[in-house]
Image: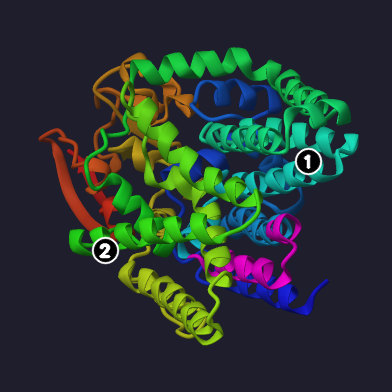
Amino acid sequence: MNFTLLFTLIVSAILRLYNNTAVALWHDEAFSALYIKYSWGEMIHRIILDVHPPLYYFLLRIWNYIFGWGLFSLRSFSILFGILTVWAGYKLVYYSFKDKRMALLAALLLAINPFQIQYSLEARMYTLGTFLALYSSYLLAKALETNKTKNWIWYGILVSACMYTHYYLIFTIIAQALYLSHYIIKNRLINFQKQGILVKAAWSYILSIILYLPWIKPLLIQITRVQQSYWIPPMDKWAIPGTIWKMTFGGQGINHTTLIIATLVTLFILLYYILKTSGIAKWHIFYGLTIPFVGALLLSLKTAIYLDRYFVFASLYLAILLSITMQNIGAKKLKTLLVMLLVFISLFAFFKNWKDMDVKNLFFERSENRKPGMAAAAEYLNSSATKNDKIVVGSSFIFFTFKYYNHTGVAPLLYSTGSLETIPHFSGTAILTNDDLILNYDGFEKNQIVWLLWTTGFGGNKPNVPGNWTLISNQSFADTPGFKGEIFVTSYQIK
């Protein structure tokens, strides 16, 4: 392996391991952790009750058999695929443009991209998806050039794997199909008919559809569920500028003036890329970046599906496009300066994002997190509650995270104003039962200790408690990022 590429992969690993467990597991990650503790049959049933495809959970469960259920283990699976994404980016660019320096720069920009790093730190399917997106793009480029049957077969398998990983990857698949069409038309249809490329490409997509057939019925069920109750807010005029900024520098938001400037700079870079980059392969990267925006915009005219984090797949192609654009700059000193500037800004943004989250640097300071969230709240409960106590959780958005950290021996109850059928699916009904809910406090006994766990995050607040509950103590634990609010552990004695 090229030494520079190896060094880049090591850098990507270090940045993704940095503070990896400093932020507590949160609601979405808790789904990943809890799904894999069911039996295989029950796990599949509950995945169907959710809104995501199953491949990530299957692979994470196998990972769990080998490396355990700890937070580092869960997140290290994402780190592994985050690193493999960097490698896949190198493969795609080197094969498509036959330029090692360009490919190494692409790998570097992927390695240090704060947005890519951010989602390498979550026990979710995002980095599995980023790897599959880039490696399937590489296989497509290879299949078009060699027309070898095995490359088309593997491409078809990875297309299906993409659809089994995250539904937003359909935009990446459409982008690839559009590039395939562009490639064929550009190189004259009749020649490709003679070579059999059209036939092999068609069979590749047919293979991917055949492999996906077992999930068609669950997909239709999930679509119906989403249409009945949805949570993503409508887009506004700052949605795309905000996404462009996050795709490049990560973070939780920036002022509007900066967003306008960043958007204009991005449009200029796109124009420069189109005008200065030679070869048909440039459209592969261009479509990979732009089609997800077009698709999300069009579908959002009917149902809001636009969400920043789902553009983690499109951001791959933005990083690659930047590397190609800078490599095309003729003035060597200017090129070097711009590369160094982008690397510096990316690393600065990486550390600034951590600073903004107010999590101390665990590599250099032996101290507790400033905002430990559920990790500390659950630790407090684990050391304070007894098996005869009751634990009531005031919000589903911390119910599952507490279940992950809970070692009290007491099964927590989720406070609810209605039965399971009245709770929207995005609150976690896929891994809830009516036995998990508490609608009133009638069954509680006199002198019993009740621990109330509640949060100000996710729009939450403190549930009402009966008048005969006497307050004993109240502890708060700040969480991060800011939308997670504070977690409170309040204890009462029933009089």
Residue 173: quadrant of the picture: top right
**For mark 1, what is the residue?**
144
The kind of secondary structure element at disc 1 is helix
Residue 311 x %, y %: 45, 46
Discs 1/2, front:
1
Q: What residue do we see at 34% from left, 32% from top? A: 414
Toward the viewer: 420 or 386?
Answer: 420
For marks 1 and 2, give the CA distance. 38 Å
Residue 211 x %, y %: 75, 22
Give the quadrant of the N terminus. bottom right
Q: What residue do we see at 65% from left, 56% from top? A: 85
Which amino acid type is shown beneath numbered disc 2? Ile
Chain part drawn in magenta: 93-113
Toward the viewer: 367 or 15?
Answer: 15
Q: Which mark is residue 261?
A: 2
Q: What residue do we see at 27% from left, 34% from top? A: 233
Left/right placement of residue 350 relative to residue 281 reads: left
Q: Is residue 114 above or below residue 411?
A: below
Q: Is residue 130 above or below residue 215?
A: below
Which amino acid type is shown beneath numbered disc 1? Leu
Left/right placement of residue 185 relative to residue 317 reads: right
Give the quadrant of the C terminus. top left
Residue 407 in view: no
**Magenta-span inclusion, residue 374:** no
Q: Which is the main secondary structure of the residues drawn in magenta?
A: helix
First of labels 1, 2 by sequence position? 1
Please count the marks in the image.
2
Residue 446 x %, y %: 24, 34
**Magenta-span inclusion, residue 97:** yes
